[in-house]
Amino acid sequence: MGKDLVKVGLVGTGTIGGSVVELLKRNGSSINEKIDFKIALGRVADRDVTRLQALKLDKSMLTTEANDVLEDPDIDIVIELIGGLEPARSFITKALENGKYVVTANKDLMATHGEELLALASENNRNIFYEASVGGGIPLIRPLKYSLVADRIQRLVGIVNGTTNYIFTRMAQDELSLEDALSEAQKFGFAEPDPTNDVEGLDAAYKLVIMASLAFGKKADLENISVQGIREVTYEDIVYAREIGCTIKLLAIGEDLPGGLALRVHPTLVPLEHPLSSVLNELNAVFVEAEAVREVMFYGPGAGPLPTATAVLADVVEAARCIRFEVANGVVESKLKETEFVPIDDLKVRFYLRFLAEDRAGIFAALANAFSDEGVSLDMITQKRRVGSMAEIVLVTHEVNEKAFHSALNKVMDTSAIKPEPSIIRLLS
């Protein structure tokens, strides 16, 4: 039997870090009763003195130097909540080398340097817990690592970015443009002042790296993810998607195919009967398809200070149990297999396409023939509003090879009757 008292050090007291302290103050006694030993906050570090003072902790616990936490021999677990790659990477490295367990919510770091940091943790007989890095307060990392370990996961499809989901919800419900919906999201704190990582799909891509590695037991790589953001989606696309029984979501999709992993992030038309279609506002959800359990969905607040703090403290409890009961908690991720990656060009999907064409007789037949000549079969083609002398055309293809579709599209668009820069969105199948 190990320690009766496990001491925790915190580096970073921003929105989430402050909420971790608040939640530990509020629920610390009940947590200790449930686990039958004691977890206590030992040291807290932040360069911002004002943040430290706002925590209303004993002054002896506060420091502006991270090393005071990382090198304190009484600290058993270090929580890293400063975000970014550096100095977070260096801090976690030092904590592990000093024999401490680590808890982090840093998705960027775990997606980029998780493999090396987890290897270092294994070398030091320690571990890194990162439940809060994906899905905020949704239990997701632990189920992928342990709860579904007896099954073979074939595909995961996730709404893992609350900002873009909020934007699409407002566009659909309030008839807003993407720009206006984004401004509203920023006003209410659902989007950062610089929303680039969210609207360009990078945030979702980081999370997909983490989820895919755990779900498929194979090393995922950010460089092998095809990423498309949401900036080109318009209110008209939202309306036309609804007319064909769909809604639009930014999805992170991972599939374990015979040729390797297929990983992609892009706006997607989701059928209204699919559970992900009803995930609204800033909420997140991950839909998992596996051989035995068939379909499972994890749903809830994907961000926010208190939900994320809940996930952080759950990891603290797990790390503390390892210390208390002297459990050799092996790093599962150290056994990830190498894999090939299937490029998006090799996948077969259905496409939604919206563009402007000359409003004249025979244009539908000409378009259908042009696509048919390139092996692309159309499921639906219809004319919408008139824009000046042009007609707005919306079509949906049957399932087609991605590369073949774009080859056909280039030839179709390279005619005087068609206005370039169409709206192209894939359908979830």
Image (tube, grey):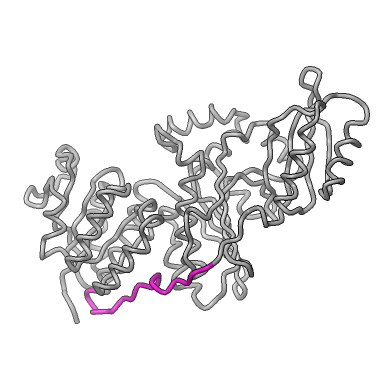
Image coords of residue 13 (percent x, y)? 23, 46
| 123 with respect to 2 (left or right) | right
Residue under the image location 15 percent in, 45 percent down: 56
Give the camera-side residue of 235 and 209.
Answer: 209
Residue 220 drawn in magenta: no
> What segment carries the magenta color?
323-339
> Which image quarter holds the C terminus?
bottom right
Image quadrant in which you'd find residue 288:
bottom right
Image quadrant in which you'd find residue 325:
bottom left
> Which image quarter holds the N terminus?
bottom left
Image coords of residue 262 (percent x, y)? 59, 60
Residue under the image location 24 percent in, 66 percent down: 101
Q: In the displayed structure, would residue 139 be above or below residue 250?
A: below
Residue 336 drawn in magenta: yes
Residue under the image location 49 percent in, 51 percent down: 205
Q: In the displayed structure, would residue 95 be above or below residue 252?
A: below
Q: Residue furthest top?
A: 388
Q: Main secondary structure of the magenta part?
A: loop
Q: In the displayed structure, would residue 43 be above or below residue 148?
A: above
Q: In the displayed structure, would residue 163 be above or below residue 94?
A: above
Q: Residue furthest bottom?
A: 1
Image quadrant in which you'd find residue 137:
bottom left
Residue under the image location 14 percent in, 55 percent down: 43
| 199 with respect to 48 (left or right) | right
Number of callouts: 0
Image coords of residue 125 (percent x, y)? 25, 74
Image coords of residue 134 (percent x, y)? 43, 55
Q: Residue furthest left?
A: 60
